[in-house]
Amino acid sequence: MLRALPRLSLLLSAPLLAQPLDLPGSLPNLAGIGVGMTSDYSGSNDTMVGVVPGLRYVTADGHLLELYGPYAQYNLGQLQGWQWGPALSLRLGRENVDDEVVARIHEIDTTLEAGGFVGYEYLNRDGYPWRARAGVAVLTNAGVVYGGARATATGTLWLPVSPRVMVGGGLGASWVSADFNRTYYGVTDADAAASGLPGYTPGGGLQQWYGWLGMIVQLTPSWYGGAMAFLQRLSGDAGASPIVTERGDRDQWTYGVGLGYAWR
């Protein structure tokens, strides 16, 4: 079954994960779609295929709107330099899973998160035209599904290897509240009785770190294709959850391809 996947938005130059990657060169506008394979839910070793949209649009007053799958942000700062603004994310829940044991523990509703981001983007215009971007995003859903918040720090680098091909990579990490971890990785007494998994009450802290490699190719003056591989490593109390250690995997892989149309 096709489902919206946050991480596949990396194919359209943005991550799973709360902070978008940047496009090569100076493309002002791009719309596209990505398709690929990722884990069924955070911590799962089952996979699913999904499709996500992507949009990068520079407004008439020079602000930047970015939409990558379920994540969107509006940059009130500069296109190159300091960037900041509001952010929204649709966080997928955990429902109707294939794992017969995890299916017996509490389900999690999909929820809307809101917050903001701040970052800095640098495009080297003298000599080799590399591009780097770093930032932090903080989001919460104000207790609708989980309490507290989560913060993600990211860094990315894009390098041209030919006039039509860019390669990129990045690293990042996420910190979460204790209530976030209890919601997504905890096992209550009722869960333990129903599933046979041991009870587990995690605290907050480092939830995951991740890294990715990608490539973007200019197919025509207006059409771009991309491919990527993305690895998340669940850490801390999230990685120690029996949902992960007994029924899933700390290593969460995503692979995919994307196609985008650019205009000025």
Image (cartoon, grey):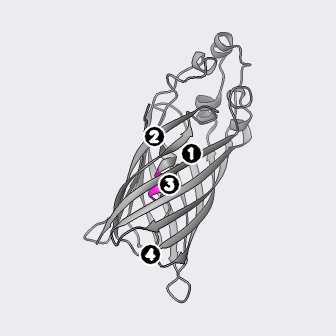
The image quadrant that residue 64 belongs to is bottom left
Foreground pick, 142 / 129: 129
Tell which circle, 1 or 2, labels the residue nearer the N-terminal end.
2
Which residue does the image show at 49% across and 65% down from the upper left? Answer: 216
Amino acid under label 2?
Answer: Gly
Specify start and end residues of the magenta stretch as a single range.
9-17
| Whether residue 77 is situated above or below residue 136 in the rendered picture | below
Name the residue that disc number 1 marks.
150
Name the residue that disc number 3 marks.
10
SS for tag 2? Answer: strand
Between disc 1 and disc 2, the foreground one is 2
Between disc 1 and disc 3, the foreground one is 3
Q: Are marks 2 and 4 in contact (CB under 8 Å)?
A: no
SS for tag 4? Answer: loop
Q: CA distance from mark 4 to mark 1?
A: 31 Å
Tell which circle, 2 or 4, labels the residue nearer the N-terminal end.
4
Foreground pick, 244 / 187: 244
Between disc 4 and disc 1, the foreground one is 4
Tell which circle, 3 or 2, labels the residue nearer the N-terminal end.
3
Name the residue that disc number 2 marks.
50
- Quadrant where the N terminus lies? top left
Tell which circle, 4 or 1, labels the residue nearer the N-terminal end.
4
